[in-house]
Image: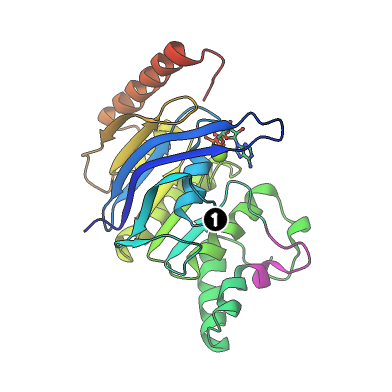
Amino acid sequence: MPTIKISHLYKTYAGSDGEGTDALEDISLEIRDGEFVCVVGPSGCGKSTLLEIVAGLLKHDSGSVTLDGVPVNGTSRDIGVVFQSPSLYPWRTVARNIALGMEFSRVPKAEQEKRLKKYIELMNLKGFENKYPGQLSGGMRQRAGIARALVMDPKVILMDEPFSAVDHLTRCTLQDELVRIRQEEKKTVLFITHDLNEAVYLADRVILLSPRPGRIQEEYTVSTPSPRSRGDEYLNHLAARIMADINRGSREEAPEYSI
Ligand SMILES: Nc1ncnc2c1ncn2[C@@H]1O[C@H](COP(=O)(O)OP(=O)(O)OP(=O)(O)O)[C@@H](O)[C@H]1O
Ligand SMILES: [Mg+2]
């Protein structure tokens, strides 16, 4: 049974002027247990919308989303979300922000501290536990957002361009950490990125959405076994092919879009 099943999903945002914005059109996608799926596509094509619907944060108009056969109606402890811009509470320290979900779920204090220590180290935030979000760089805030999701040990991780504000070297390290976490802890991952090299390096499957309204334009299976090497010829070739398909899709539908 697939972990996430999205069937014929449509979403239109209502506009104040009566003109709606069609964001998603007839999206059907199954993500199997333990699979790593990357979603790419031009800016504004509906990627974040899709992720928010799967996370149970946004209502769709028609179609369905199920997690292990159960309709997604609101947020769930089984689904961890890393947002495009991490919304940390400015009045809470980094540690208290990361621990937020554990506090809500009444995880015992000792266990909270154990997990905090692990993810603060993993996300390279040691020494910044007691700082406030306003005292961090953009990349550090993003890493705190990632820690906040992982610390809950969710079955499914939804990530919306989680590494976009992280410097290149840290980005490579975090990518490898994610590959390791996913393999060791058997996570199912839905990952949005603008970076096609990142997509092919990480994913089992890459889904290309068309310019808005987002429809599934293409699907690519990345068969290279893990661990993969950066600069692998096949992966480079695949990234170039996806770029060509994006350009083709944009030319056919909306020339003003860029990735
Ligand atoms: N709350 C909202 N109200 C109205 N329209 C919205 C809202 N959120 C998004 N949209 C519109 O829906 C479309 C899809 O937006 P979305 O944020 O899902 O795109 P995206 O693919 O994530 O883009 P990016 O790559 O730039 O992050 C855009 O045209 C956007 O203007
Ligand atoms: Mg987005």
Residue type at mark 1: give it: Leu
Q: Residues within 10 Å of mark 1 (few under 14, many from 20)?
A: some
| Residue 247 placement: quadrant | top left
Q: Residue furthest front?
A: 18
Residue 19 among those drawn in magenta? no
Q: Nearer the viewer, residue 184 or 208?
A: 208
The residue depicted at 78 percent of the width and 67 percent of the height is 91
Q: Residue at x 25, y 29 (%)?
A: 234
Residue that label 1 marks: 57
| Residue 233 position in % (x across, y down) | 27, 28
Quadrant of the rendered image holding ligand 2: top right
Residue at 32% across, 41% down:
28
What count of labels does the image hold?
Answer: 1
Task: Tell me which secondary structure the magenta stretch mostly adopts.
Answer: loop
State whether residue 84 appears in this view. Answer: yes
- Dot 1: element: loop
The x and y percentages for residue 141 are 65, 54
User: Bounds of the magenta span?
Assistant: 88-97
72 on left or right of 123: left
Please say which color scheme the image uses.
rainbow
User: How far from the left and from the top, in percent, is residue 55?
Assistant: 48, 56
Q: Is residue 149 above or below residue 218?
A: below
Seen in the picture, residue 145 relative to 241 is either above or below; the reply is below
Q: Decide whether residue 91 is among the magenta residues.
A: yes
Which image quarter holds the N terminus? bottom left
**Direction from residue 2 to residue 102 in the image, left or right:** right
